[in-house]
Amino acid sequence: MLDRPLPSNAVLTHFLQQVTDFLPNLVVAILILVAGFAVAGWIARLIGRGLGATTQVDATVRAPLIAAVRYLVIVFALIIALGQVGVQMTSLLAVLGAAGLAVGLALQGTLSNIAAGIMLLWLRPFRIGDYIETSSVSGYVREIGLFVCHIETFDGVFVFAPNSTLWNVWMRNHSRAGARLVAWSVTLPRTLAFDEVAGALHGIWPSAAETGLTAPVAYLDQLNGDNQVIVFRGVVMEGSITTIQRETPQRIRQAFLDRFGADGEPRAIQRLVPGDSDPARYVGDVAAPNAHPQVLAGAETRPAAEPAAH
């Protein structure tokens, strides 16, 4: 026999009873979430102060570590809150697995940023405070996050660069090496003796100064009509690259004016960037790079060319 429908007042009473039974659990779940967010923030601040007070943990990994701990606490609080309102975790995990697959396919770019961030933190191509340069952005690294890196350009603009855009492209780290090679091309009248020109160039920066240009070398690079082009290069120690690049052209000009007068006025002074395709103009090695042994063996066994037929 079918059950007769409940009267309207009985339905309302049953509904109010269900709401009354569920409401305390909902309030507790909300309180758990609020407490979870508060505890996550408190733990994140506590870990941040602790990591800031120690020198054992690199500043590069501090921000991602703090963010990971914060999200972990929030997820844990969310699971407890859902269990409080009666959500079955087994069914929830199955639904989250299916939803995670769909979301992962839809957010491939975002997930690639997380993977790139992990690789950046693991291999450390740059650290907090380094000045980096890519094909699209250059500046000081201020923070490395799970999704983006915060980069401050030289003119004070903050750029939020996705991690994948920094991991999948070539990069120059201007802060990685302690010493830098710099070079200038100086165009002078051909009438000036090279020995005197080299002496004037070597005197613009004391080679023994810690903040000056060390190992200076001057050599004749080109002869063009009435001009001679001299390449002047040297090594700059860490912390002096800006001073050297800005002051060297003026020092070169003043040194030639003092030594040769108006006739020694340089016709052009240009800073050179060493080219990857022709490093022989800048490096100190006299010999060419050594060929691979297999290449040399192949050259020795190569048959001689036959004489041309007449």
Image: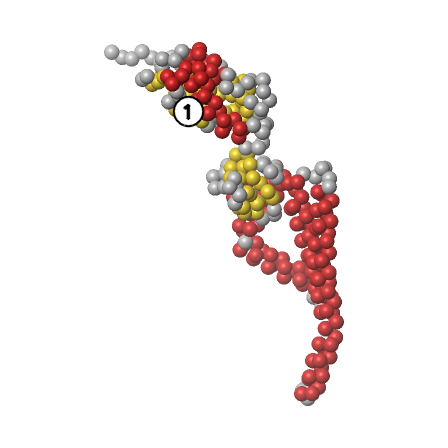
Q: Where is residue 56 in the image (x, y as percent from the top left)?
A: 72, 37
Q: Residue at x 72, y 53 (%)?
A: 42
Quadrant where the image shows the C terminus: top left
- Compared with 130, 294 (above or below) is above
Mark 1 secondary-structure assignment? strand
Viewer-proximal residue among 307 and 13: 13
Quadrant where the image shows the N terminus: bottom right
Q: Residue furthest left?
A: 310
Residue 277: quadrant of the picture: top left
- Horizontal side, residue 171 vs residue 36: left or right: left
Identify residue for label 1. Answer: 269
Coloration mode: secondary structure
| Residue 195 in view, yes or no | yes
| Residue 297 in view, yes or no | no
Q: Residue at x 60, y 56 (%)?
A: 100
- Compared with 20, 41 (above or below) is above
Q: Position of residue 86 (x, y in %)?
A: 72, 68
- Horizontal side, residue 180 vs residue 93: left or right: left
Q: Residue at x 52, y 45 (%)?
A: 157
Q: Where is residue 14 in the image (x, y as percent from the top left)?
A: 71, 82
